[in-house]
Amino acid sequence: MALKIEKVDVWAAPLRDRPGSLAGKLCALEDAGANLGFVIARRTGKKSAKKGVAFLTPLSGAKQLAAARKTGFKKTKSLHSVRIEGANRRGVGAEITTALAEAGINIRGLSAAAIGSKFVCHVAFDKTAEATKAARVLRRL
């Protein structure tokens, strides 16, 4: 299975649970030239907490990093991610997760999507060593 595998930095920012909170942050990054490949946002805790969090990747260059910092994004130190891209076919997700499990690597989180004939998957780990090992294991598939 031909896969493109790379370790990626993940950026996170708190959100207020109200209309426009995420839009404002994404617009600022777009204005700075960011072309994001992955964004996930969600509420944290109970609805009454009125808080959320956004995760995204990639960011690069001084202008994008400055915009990220200005809007509350920080490169995560506790979330280490591997991006996997390849041809979509039945069972590819099971193959990826089975390979990681057989290597004794615990997954912190996984987000994946298929569009047409391709898929992209982001797998998160607690430690950079786990992400490095996962990338090595997945390159053997």
Image: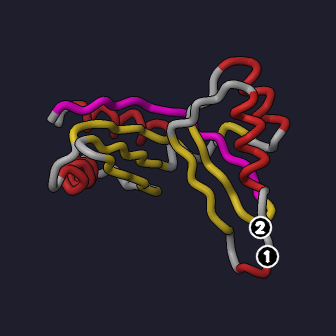
Q: Considering depth in this image, is 54 or 140 the residue closer to the camera?
A: 54
Name the one closer to the observer, 114 or 78: 114
Q: State left or right for residue 99 relative to residue 19.
A: left
x 38%, y 52%: residue:
112
- The answer to if 6 sits in the magenta stretch is yes
Image x and y of residue 28, in percent = 77, 37
From the viewer's perspective, is 115 left or right of 17? left
The quarter holding residue 63 reads top right
Q: Quadrant of residue 135?
A: top left
The stretch of residues the image draws in magenta is 2-15
Rendered residue at 79%/76% (across/down): 49
The residue beneath circle 2 is: 17
Rendered residue at 23%/42% (across/down): 117
Q: Residue furthest top?
A: 61
Type of the residue with mark 1: Ala
Circle 1 sits on which residue?
49
Q: Residues within 10 Å of mark 1 (few under 14, many from 20)?
A: few
Residue at 76% over, 45% down: 25
- Where residue 71 sits in the image (x, y, percent)? 81, 41
User: In the image, residue 31 lies at what x, y percent?
Assistant: 75, 30
Label 2 or label 1, whichever comes before in sequence order: 2
Depth order, front residue of 102/48? 48
The Cα atoms of the two marked residues, 2 and 1, are separated by 8 Å
